[in-house]
Image (cartoon, helix red, strand yellow):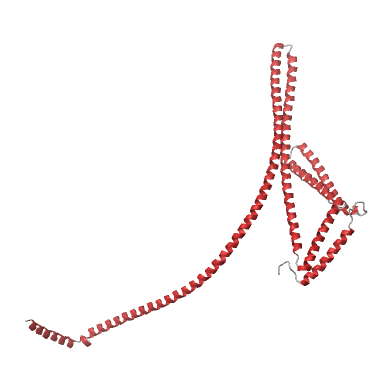
């Protein structure tokens, strides 16, 4: 029996529970209204949650006002830049909290049970659950298993995972777009600051021009000719400076337009790159499935090869044990023969030593064949035999 099969008693108990659940879901489907709008208890359903969100929104707004007032006071003092930066970070966090609270409020309003769309969604979920439980009940009655329930759960899990992936991709794209928008805003602010500085420079030069004109009018009575020459030179210089500044302003305007065009092209490129990345993800998912299948096949082949090698190893181990036993027995026999030969050689050496020692004793003590009488007789016998041999030679 597999994990999805049950015994008859358990299947009967579970079938009874599922049957009761299906009946209750059917009754719930008949008694549920199409919408809560216009009903007296509608406000009580969502009033508490919306009240919490509104209170949180008010608290964040109060914090924002306090931080803005503190920032204005810190900018007026211009003493502590660290506190100003910390205040700016706190303002950013509060603004993020306000945005999140607004999003939560909108989400709560969208998911409110007062709308007919959410009630329809609830009815669809109830119908789906009733259908799955009905199929599971029939399967339990027929085969004492619940494969339909497992398949439905796995299918819903896969759908949820795909939706989660899509949401994550969308959030990443939004983050990139926000980052690019921040960069564009920073560039615009920088360009506006530069233009403002140029305008201030023009105004300053105009002020200088007016001063020069006033000076020339005051000194015209005394050095009119020199003043006219100086005025002409100053006017020419101012004209050149104004012309240069106008050219710079036009150049900056062209750069701003170019930056805007670059921004549009970057957005188009990012969209194209996102589509390419999605295609690559699909390609790698297919490649992953193929590689997993190939590696599974290789694993099966290696397992079969391992089993064959294991059987061969067992046979060789058995044969090696037999050969090793024969070699050990042969070594034991050879060792016995070697020890026997060594023992015989030692015994022979001992006998030779004993004989040599005994002969030495007999020679020193003139015993046996080494006595003096026998030596004399031996000498006489040798002489007589020598004479007989001499006669024969003659």
Question: Is 381 displayed left or right of 105 in the figure?
Answer: left
Question: Is 238 displayed left or right of 322 in the figure?
Answer: right
- 80 or 369: which is nearer to us? 369
Residue drawn where x is 58% and y is 62% of the image: 301
Q: Position of residue 1 (x, y in %)?
A: 71, 70
Q: Quadrant of residue 88?
A: top right
- Count the marks: 0
Q: Position of residue 64 (x, y in %)?
A: 81, 43
Query: From the viewer's perspective, is residue 202 above or below residue 286?
Result: above
Q: Quadrant of residue 382?
A: bottom left
Q: Residue furthest right?
A: 40
- 340 or 109: which is nearer to us? 109
Q: Residue furthest front?
A: 142
Residue drawn where x is 77% and y is 39% of the image: 74
Question: Is 309 displayed left or right of 206 in the figure?
Answer: left
Q: Residue furthest left?
A: 394
């Amino acid at each position: 029996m597999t994990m999805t099969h049950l015994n008859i008693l358990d299947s009967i108990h579970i079938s009874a529970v599922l049957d009761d659940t299906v009946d209750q879901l059917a009754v719930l489907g008949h008694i549920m209204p199409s919408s809560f709008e216009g009903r007296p208890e509608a406000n009580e359903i969502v009033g508490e949650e919306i009240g919490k969100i509104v209170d949180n929104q008010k608290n964040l707004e109060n914090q924002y006002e306090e931080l803005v007032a503190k920032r204005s006071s810190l900018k007026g003092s211009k003493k502590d830049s660290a506190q100003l930066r910390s205040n700016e970070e706190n303002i950013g966090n509060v603004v993020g909290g306000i945005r999140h609270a607004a999003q939560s409020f909108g989400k709560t309003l969208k998911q409110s049970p007062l709308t007919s769309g959410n009630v329809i969604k609830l009815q669809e979920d109830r119908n789906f659950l009733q259908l799955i439980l009905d199929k599971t009940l029939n399967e339990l009655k027929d085969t004492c298993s619940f494969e339909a329930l497992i398949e439905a759960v796995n299918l819903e899990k896969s759908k949820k995972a795909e939706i989660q992936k899509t949401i994550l991709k969308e959030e990443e794209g939004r983050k990139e777009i926000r980052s690019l928008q921040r960069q564009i805003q920073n560039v615009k602010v920088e360009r506006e600051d530069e233009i403002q500085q140029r305008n201030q420079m023009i105004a300053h030069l105009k002020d200088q021009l007016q001063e020069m004109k006033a000076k020339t009018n005051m000194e015209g009575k005394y050095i009119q000719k020199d003043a006219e020459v100086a005025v002409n030179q100053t006017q020419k210089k101012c004209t050149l400076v104004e012309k240069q500044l106008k050219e710079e302003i036009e150049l900056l305007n062209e750069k701003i337009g170019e930056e805007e065009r670059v921004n549009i092209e970057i957005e188009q490129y990012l969209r194209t790159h996102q589509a390419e990345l999605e295609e690559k993800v699909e390609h790698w998912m297919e490649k992953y499935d193929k590689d997993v299948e190939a590696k599974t096949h290789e694993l099966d082949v290696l397992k079969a090869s391992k089993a064959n090698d294991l059987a061969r190893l067992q046979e060789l181990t058995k044969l090696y044990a037999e050969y090793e036993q024969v070699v050990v027995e042969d070594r034991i026999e050879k060792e016995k023969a070697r020890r026997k030969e060594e023992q015989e050689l030692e015994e022979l050496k001992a006998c030779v030593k004993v004989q040599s020692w005994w002969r030495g004793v007999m020679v020193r003590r003139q015993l046996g064949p080494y006595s003096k009488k026998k030596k004399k007789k031996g000498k006489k016998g040798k002489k007589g035999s020598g004479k007989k041999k001499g006669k024969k030679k003659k």
